[in-house]
Amino acid sequence: MAQKREDRNNDNPNIELFVKASNDAESVGNCPFSQRLFMILWLKKVKFLLTTVDMKRAPDVLKELAPGSQPPFLVFNDDVKTDVNKIEEFLEEKLAPPKYPKLCCRYKESLSAGEDIFRKFSAYIKNPIPGLNDMLQKNFLSTLVKLNMYLETPLPHELDQNPYATESTRPYLDGDSLTLADCNLLPKLNIVKVVCKMYRDFDIPDELKGLKRYLDNAYKREEFRMSCPKDVEILIAYQSVAKYLNK
């Protein structure tokens, strides 16, 4: 998939994505922003070079290409870009139809679905006080329920097809295809899933059928599954901040 750079034009751009390396410096590390851009490029079906950066060695590549920045950053035909949101917008503009698929959402609500999950997850998982656990878990769970409601609610195009539909069957946030919204949310949900299981023995409840369906469909897609860091990388990243509760 990742290719050496060859041509220097917008039809066949030279793209290199720099991402955080794993703890052993051999594979992709834990960074949802890196995975977000990795997924976007993969879904665009564009040739690109993926370069992992070992942050423990403060590599010269950072000083040369993106001084003062940390991965992820992108080099597009020798133009260096470091802001993740702007990189996403840039790629959607430059890698456009008919040659490349568009990944933007039909519905603006899809872009904000699940946006509060990671903040409530962080408060829940970093809490060392057993007496606060139930409250923080309830707050965190409420964000999952909210996302589940969005995933179970039929979108306008589904109602156009079946005006009597009461529950959505779509596989992803915005419909039948992975979009920029999924590239943003899924890497975070993967972290949530792995860390909560380890430190709280917490699994996403089976009652949240829309969310379970969403994740099941996502893990079937290689663009998501193969861009995920190994579980051990996620756990290493959280071992200094996630707290076991001693009840």
Image: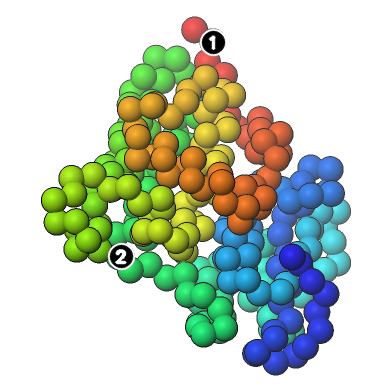
Q: Where is residue 7 in the image (x, y as percent from the top left)?
A: 77, 88
- Report the amino acid beneath label 1: Asn
Name the residue nearer the viewer: 94 or 218.
218
- Counting the numbered discs, the total is 2
Discs 2/1, front = 2
Q: Residues within 10 Å of mark 1 (few under 14, many from 20)?
A: few
Quadrant in which residue 60 is drawn: bottom right
Residue position marked by numbered label 2 in the rendering: 108
Query: Residue 51: which numbered mark, if any?
Result: none
- Tag 2 near tag 1, CB within 8 Å: no
Residue at image x 70%, y 40%? Answer: 230
Name the residue nearer the viewer: 150 or 170.
170
Sequence-wise, which precedes: disc 2 or disc 1? 2
Q: Where is residue 169 in the image (x, y as percent from the top left)?
A: 32, 47
Name the residue nearer the viewer: 142 or 167.
167
Task: Give the side of residue 224 with respect to residue 64, left or right.
Answer: left
Looking at the picture, the colour scheme in use is rainbow
Residue position marked by numbered label 1 in the rendering: 246
Residue at image x 49%, y 40%? Answer: 216
Q: Where is residue 151 in the image (x, y as percent from the top left)?
A: 32, 47
Q: In this view, does 62 lie above or below 20?
A: below
Q: In this view, does 217 lie above or below 61?
A: above
Task: Give the side of residue 138 with respect to residue 64, left or right.
Answer: left
- Report the amino acid beneath label 2: Lys
